[in-house]
Image (tube, grey):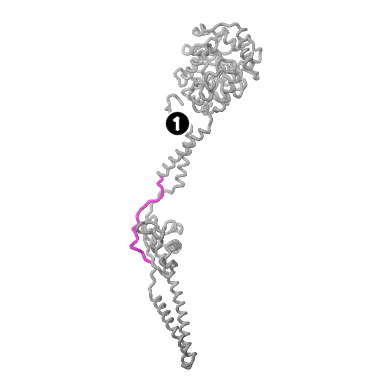
Amino acid sequence: MNDDELELGHYGRIFRRSWWIIALSVLGMVAISLFLLPGQRNFYESQATVRLVPSLGDVGRINDPINEDTEAIVAKSLGDKVVNGSEFPITLEKWEDNLLVTACLNTSALIVTNDCNTQILEFKYRSSSAEKTSYILNRSIEAYLAERLERSSGIRDNTLNQLTLQLDDLDLRIETEEAILQNADPESVEYTLAEIRLRRIEPERLDLRSQFNNLQNTPLDVGFVLGSQSTPKAEASGVPRLFAILAGIMMGLLLGGLAAILLDRLDRRVSSPEETERDLGVPVLGDIPRITEGAPALVTAVSSEAEGAEAFRRLAAAALAPRNGFVVDSIAVTGATDGEGRTTAAVNLALAISQAGRNVMLVAADRRNASVDQIFGLSSEPGLSDFLRGKGDLDAARSAIESAPQRLGITVMPTGLGATSPLSNNGLAALLAVAQERSMIVIFDSPPALTHADGLQIAAVVDAVYIVAAVGRTRRSELNELRIQLLNVQADVVGSIINRNSRLSLLPGGYGDVGSVTIPTGIPGNGASTTPTAAHTFGARSSSNEAPQASPAMSADLEVVEDADVINEVSDDLEESA
């Protein structure tokens, strides 16, 4: 996060970094809400109450002859009769969906009672128009009452037929008994028995005849509509589309935020300077902002006012501060893995120190990644590998340093040509000794110390080690392992550098540490001339073979040491660290 951006706190940084998760969650929940929540639909609804009259077709109990639940099911089963011949086009499915028949409704409290003996059915129907609603509701009630009447009529007709058969049988028996009475002796037993049977049959016949007449003459009444049908009124059902969208947005923000926090808990990559300080046990001395068009890779070479230049100047001030009473003459900029921005930090640190008045030599020690060569256009120049393939003594070191090209006011030793040679302890000692006798501070663009032995070997002999950690890329477990590895070689880890540009690659050809650089006008570049203009001094030196001189501010604090003493001291340090 840049210095001028609003500090949102820990969760604010999480949400800002995982904005795409929240955006996808919001879009997904809005789509789900619109799909699952029923859309708002305008309709007209009307209702009517039917009072049921007990009839022959009811199969309830003695104290509750009508089974209202059964009658509601029957009413909902007459869709074919309602749909067929309807004046309005309607399907059976639509009719079943829009018709509501409620049984056992307590009209005073509008609740369903446990004792279902109200003998009332409530019919409700809804449709897109008032006229259609009234028509279909009336037709549904008429169809139900007609079915109920038909059911009762059928049972009455069956009962009348049975009574007629019983009456005919009784008439036949009466005729038989009367014939016996006419032919038998009045004093005989047969006459007496026929007389007794005839007296029993006559009342039974009269009762059946009475039942028959009552059933035949009583009109059928199965039910009727209480009052009148209610006037259809406009209503709306479902969820408004705007409410569904708002609900989806709220659910999306909630779920997206929870997902972002969960991923942050599971993601063990560096996200803040505080995490780096806890894992490495050293302070964060540099917080490098994201590289943009306004803040290019070599921001310190463009303008002191450019974004990010101040961060490198603060880092240079910390690097120049004495360590335990000794002046720092060599620095290794390393990291855990590739692509963390080590070269960006090393080059800008070298430029910032040069601007502060020190003679600086930048060594492209990461020979597997020629980023420094790409920046300064030194891909075809001899360098570190060529020096290591030689004797690697003081004379060779002096020759290598004197022949190293000058770029932007600093001496740059490229990776070199040909096959990569093993890093020699004697060669490192010779380079550091010659640089010390020339009052030069050496900045190593070191390979990752966790994956390449060269990084640990360099870290063991330099005065100070700076670890670059890339936000969103470097894992905290890697930092912990790197700290242990550096402790094993007794490296002096001074601080760490937070690089917030870890996911941006500006170099062509797959280089991931820095971007390709156009040398600013007036600053020594790829040409033969290396004399800086007045506008960009940066402590630059001429390209002659004369040894660079220490700046006046620093020369008083430095002591010229004999070559043998210096190289022996550095060699002893290398042997102890190995």
| In the foreground, 164 or 80 | 164
Q: Is residue 472 visible?
A: yes
| In the foreground, 132 or 243 | 243
Q: Tell me, yes or no, whether the highlighted magenta stretch contains residue 239.
A: yes
Residue 569 percent location from the top left of the image = 61, 10
Q: Residues within 10 Å of mark 1 (few under 14, many from 20)?
A: few
Residue 563 located left or right of residue 348: right
Tell me the quarter of the picture where residue 213 sits.
bottom left
Residue 156 percent location from the top left of the image = 43, 73
**Residue underneath mark 1:** 12
Q: Tell me, yes or no, whether the highlighted magenta stretch contains residue 138.
A: no
Residue 229 located left or right of residue 326: left
Residue span colored magenta = 223-241
Q: Amino acid at mark 1?
A: Gly
User: Which residue is at a point 45% across and 21% down the rendered structure image?
Assistant: 307
Residue 357 percent location from the top left of the image = 49, 11
Residue 538 percent location from the top left of the image = 49, 13
Q: Secondary structure at mark 1?
A: helix
Residue 377 to residue 84: above or below: above
Tell me the quarter of the picture where residue 241 sits.
top left
